[in-house]
Amino acid sequence: MLATITELSDYTLEATDGEIGFIDELYFQEEEWQIRYLVIGLGNWFTRQHVLLVPGVIDRLNMDLEKVNFKLTREQIKNSPDVLSQLPVSREKELALHRYYQWQPYWMGHAADGISYGTHAVWPEAVTDVEDESEQAHEAQVALAELGDVESKAGPFSLRSTNEVTGYYIRAVDGEIGHIDDFVIDLRNWRIRYLVVDTRNWLPGRRVLVASDWIQKIDWQNAEVSVSLTKESVEKSPEYDPSALDDDYEAKLEKHYAAALPTYRHEGLS
């Protein structure tokens, strides 16, 4: 189940009691290219312009009907904390959002996907009686401290916007090859699987895919992404066709880079 952000932006989004808007962009962790939030544009039905929802609250996603159903009501979304959809999102605001929805925070575990962190967590109530030395009270205090730890490894600047990264230059090991035009999302685990690269200004005008696993580093200051590929290997890779993004295409892509780069290995296609 693969789809680009451009495609997802045209999907109809529905709460349990009506439509809610559209997918405007996605927030992801730069270390893992894992989607953590869907930035939902609310249109005219609500005074706020955007809200953040985690992939785990998706009830059904129908690619044929281009529709996404959420497990939330419009009222729940309306009353959610006002988390500004402008980076960086502070950990305090994330914590308020997750507590409101009773979501298990993604920074509290090691799951490899964005789905398991949309499930409900057991949020301990704050302990007000300081004289209560019971084991239950102590455990609640510890749990709350851990959930609100703003110094955890997934700091506020680890979240990036797909809108922000669109247009970044792609640099191969021997020069620039194009810029990021779109993103291909694996909807089974809500991870960015490929960057869609437009090569028209560097190579024969066409679009190709570069897997997020091949990225060496991101230079945020210079708006540039470095990949462990040569210009020639990218130039000769199978051309990207959105209508033919299937297992056969991925197999061709895998075969091409395996032949072009002797040390190449990419487990994401298996």
Image (cartoon, rainbow, N blue to C red):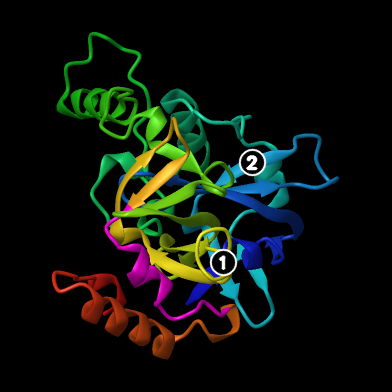
Report the side of 179 relative to 82 (left or right).
Answer: left
Residues drawn in magenta: 227-241
Residue 230 colored in magenta in the image: yes
At 46% across and 32% down in the image, what residue appears?
94
Image coords of residue 98 (percent x, y): 46, 38
Residue position marked by numbered label 2 in the rendering: 51
As drawn, 209 above or below 159: below
Badge nearest the viewer, 2 or 1: 1
Tell me the tag on residue 41. none
- Which type of secondary structure does the marked residue at label 1 adopt? strand
Helix, strand or loop under label 2: strand
Q: Is residue 115 visible?
A: yes
**Looking at the magenta stretch, what is its main secondary structure?**
loop
- Identify the disc placed on residue 4: 1
Residue 222 percent across, percent down from the top left = 45, 34
Is 141 placed above or below 226 here? above
* Identity, as a three-letter code, of the amino acid under mark 2: Val
Q: Residues within 10 Å of mark 1 (few under 14, many from 20)?
A: some
Marks 2/1: CA–CA distance? 21 Å
